[in-house]
Amino acid sequence: MTDNLWQWCEVFNSDNAIEAHLIKGLLEQANIDVLLKGEALLGALGEIPLDQAKVSVWVYKIKLRQAQELLVNYQQQEQSTEWQCPECDEFNGPAFQACWQCGKDYEQSK
């Protein structure tokens, strides 16, 4: 029974290696061991179908619920709306932590 908890489970996949690495870093910050699979296949795009060239993020089954909760929070942040910089009035996407125009920190603008 306990051996089952130490099996790898896929928690996320993407055709974007950068996003997969962002997710990997997010999970590792929470002390969750992470395994990436499929990175080498991205170089073969065009030779193999796109749906087979995804990078997948795997965690131990014992950490699956914690990883899923972190991913839900991450995805909710990604879907949040743009914010307007009070310094230069530039609109910034939800992924920006600082204004891309003037560099003012998002947290300081609240």
Image: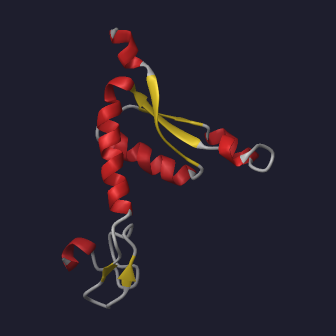
Taking the view exactly as shown, the residue that stands out farthest to the top is 1
* Image x and y of residue 60, in percent: 39, 26
Q: Quadrant of the N terminus?
A: top left
Please determine whether, in this image, residue 99 is positioned above or below residue 65.
below
x, y percentage for residue 105? 27, 75
Question: Is residue 98 or residue 89 the one in the foreground?
Answer: 89
Q: Is residue 31 above or below residue 107?
A: above
Q: Is residue 70 visible?
A: yes
* Residue 31 in view of the camera: no
* Residue drawn at point x = 70 percent, y = 48 percent: 50
| Rendering coords of residue 107 (x, y %) | 22, 71
Q: Residue at x 56, y 50 (%)?
A: 17
Task: Give the mark count.
Answer: 0
Q: Which quadrant holds residue 92?
A: bottom left
- Does residue 100 appear to the left or right of 83 in the view shown? right
- Residue 21 relative to residue 88: left or right: right
Residue at image point 81% right, 45% down: 47
Q: Nearer the viewer, residue 90 or 5?
A: 5
Above/below status of 8 relative to 109: above
The colouring scheme, among rainbow, by chain, secondary structure or one colour, is secondary structure
**Would you identify the image quadrant in which residue 98 lies?**
bottom left
Quadrant housing the C terminus: bottom left
In the picture shown, does residue 54 fall above or below 98? above
